Image: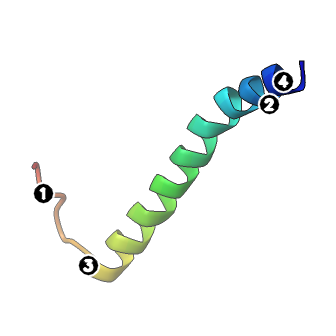
């Protein structure tokens, strides 16, 4: 039962955490580069 709850919690939290980390990385990269226009690759 505990492992099932843990798996459910991970299933819910993983996308949120990943999205948060990705957003932070993108902010860092964009702050470092300061692009005048966004590249389309």
Q: Residue 24: x and y, percent?
A: 50, 63
Mark 2–mark 4 CB contact (< 8 Å) = yes
Residue at the disc numbered 4: 5
Residue 31 left/right relative to 24: left
User: In terms of secondary structure, where does tag 2 sit?
Assistant: helix
Of the 4 image quadrants, the one containing the N terminus is top right
Q: CA distance from mark 4 to mark 1?
A: 42 Å
User: Under tag 1, what secondary structure?
Assistant: loop
Residue 9 drawn above or below residue 23: above
Q: Which residue is mark 3?
A: 33
Q: CA distance from mark 3 to mark 4?
A: 42 Å
Whichever of labels 2 and 1 marks the residue nearer the N terminus, that label is 2
- Marked residue nearer the N-terminal end (3 or 1): 3
Location of residue 30 in the rendering, given as x and y in whole percent from the top left corner: 33, 70
Q: Position of residue 22 (x, y in %)?
A: 45, 54
Q: Is residue 24 above or below residue 3?
A: below
Answer with mark 4 or mark 1, whichever residue precedes in sequence: 4
Residue placed at 81% from the left, 26% from the top?
3
Query: Is the Cβ of the residue at disc 2 closer than 8 Å to that at disc 3?
Result: no
Cα separation between marks 2 and 1: 40 Å
Q: Nearer the viewer, mark 3 or mark 4?
A: 4
């Amino acid at each position: 039962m505990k492992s099932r709850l843990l798996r459910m919690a991970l299933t819910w939290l993983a996308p949120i955490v990943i999205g948060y980390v990705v957003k932070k990385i993108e902010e860092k990269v964009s702050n470092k580069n300061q692009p005048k226009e966004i590249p389309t690759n």
